[in-house]
Amino acid sequence: MSNSVLLPILIPLIGAIICLFFRGSLKVQRIVSGAVATAMPFVAFALLLTVREHGVMVLRSGAWPGPFGIVFALDQFGAIMLVLSGIVQAAAWWFLAAGALDRERETFLLHPLFLFLCTGVNWAFSTGDLFNLFVSFEIILLASYALISHGNERTQIRESLKYVILNLVASTLFLVAAGFTYGMFGSLNLAELAVRFAQLGYPPETRVLGTLFLFVFGMKAALYPMFYWLPDAYPKAPRGISAYFAGILTKVGVYCLYRVFTLLFRDEGAFASWFQPIILAIGGLTMIVGVMGALSQFSFRRILSFHIISQIGYMIFGLGIFTPLAIAAGIFYIIHHIIVKAALFLVGDAVEVNEGSQSLRKVAGLVKLSPALSVFFLLAAFSLAGIPPLSGFYGKYGLAVEGYVEGHAFYVAVSLLTSLFTIASMAKIWRYSFWGERPEGAAKKLSNTGVVAATGGLVAVSVVVALASAWIMGVSTDAANQLLDRTEYVDAVLGTRGVEALQLAMKEPVE
Amino acid sequence: MAFLTSFIVFLLFASGLYLIMQRNLFEVLLGTNLLSHGTNLFLISMSGWHPDTLPPILVEAFGHDPSPYVDPVPQALILTAIVISFGVTAFLVVLMMRGVEETGTLEAGELAAGEDEE
């Protein structure tokens, strides 16, 4: 039992509440939000190290034993996600504090909403209970609804409406799936459900539930048939915070997919015959359709939004292969993607802050305006495409090798083709916006260098990910092994009773 | 009873989904409400209620046998779900009011005419 599991939830929540008391004062809000954003990466990193050393951290609310109370359980994968959420939050705060938005807009509840968003995300990463996961999703969604319509423009209202209604339907289905789970298996605790599924020998109902969860979380993660809302909604988020949207929000869905498919739906027969073909096909389609969308767009944010979809495909591909190395490569890919994608969104936003537009048709010659920003873009874009010394390479390499070894050569080919198109669409941004002559009457100097510095900070983190790739790959491998060998998680939540029941059910010798 | 409940859940979901796909924003709003009612009714049907069950207050005569009581957990879930759907509905109403201010009608199609950067 450890109360520190709650820190990543409580710190932003308290920060948000303090901000609400100082609604009129931007200064106080920035200081409070900044203190939270500075603290979060360190707190999360400390938690990651603790989890790596002492195993899964569990908090039983009210000290109720095993499956009866509400449980928070943080394993290595969850802790990694918390670290990433903290890093992106810090970068987004820095970007905002550099004056990315006009004062009036930033003063109006922006910081508290952002902190509520972080609360919900961190909650989702550390809960061990299906219904709590639903509640954390709703916190994330309500904050993101408000943030997407923040600014009150006509297009924002329209996209926000679409986003709200689609997510309402997805949430309804999530609740129905949770209800079915409770009605059929009598528990909402994830570890307890893992044991009960195994004890009952994975009855056919688990396939229905697995498919429902695939749909629900796939909607949040913007998987192939359910991705159309993302490229419309995300570009409407306020500058700076859009990096958090792009980096973290869809990955909450991916995280949940990794969680439920490694913990709950582990029936090997059903996985090979039902889930694996579906997940692989969806992964491949998500990759290729996303990047095709990106090729046809003409604005920074929309190109990048389509790229998010395409890269979610890689992560799902890793889950579909379902070997320790593939899951590890998938986790590495998530780490790389979150940092790099957030950095690219910050580049786009920095361009908008300085040039007043993100359209490739209106912005040109950025190399002359700011060589630093160009270098940042180039590093992040090459990393996204997977050029060797940069961080994107390792995850893609792992996925390609493991996919080929496991006999999914077709999807490996799709993923390599997708990389090629990725670099093509990045070259398009480069060709139109960074090269060429400055338009007449355009500014000769950056009007806001602070936002470029914030972008550089996040790009620097992505370079660190590349340099420390050996260590990070080690962390991802440990996290993947912990996900696949469920005993540690079940042991931490339910104690030996749960592990013994699970091992007996899986017909493994009890040690 | 189970048949009646599931039929009503079906009815609420079907009409909710139908209304969500309408162009009039107010009908969409009603649709979301019907959907959440359907979900709540569905959840309560998971508590194993039938006419002979007792409220979940322990009676000494039954000892530790849980079978005569109705399961209280789905009711707790529904309470949470109701609060959440209340919050979302409130937000949706405000958003739609802004849409009406912007276009003067409740037609969703009118909003599509907005300027958009490529």
Image (cartoon, rainbow, N blue to C red):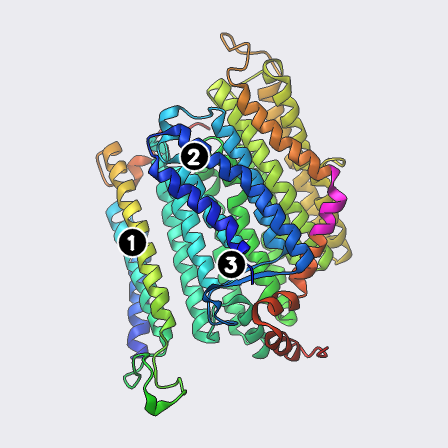
Q: Is residue A75 above or below residue A450?
A: below
Q: Secondary structure at mark 3?
A: loop
Q: Is residue B52 above or below residue A196?
A: below
Residue positioned most to the top: A441
Q: Nearer the viewer, mark 2 or mark 3?
A: 3
Expressed as whole percent of the image width and height from the top left, the position of residue A459 reads 64, 31
Please, what is the three-letter code of the amino acid marked with disc 2?
A: Lys
Q: Secondary structure at mark 1?
A: helix
The residue under label 1 is B86
Q: Secondary structure at mark 2?
A: helix
Looking at the rendered structure, the number of numbered marks drawn on it comes to: 3
Please, what is the three-letter code of the amino acid marked with disc 3?
A: Thr
Circle 3 crowding by C-alpha within 10 Å: few under 14, some 14–19, many from 20: many
The residue under label 3 is A127
Expressed as whole percent of the image width and height from the top left, the position of residue A206 reads 53, 71
The residue under label 2 is A236
Q: Residue at x 76, y 37 (%)?
A: A388
The magenta segment is A467-475
Q: Is residue A216 above or below residue A394?
A: below
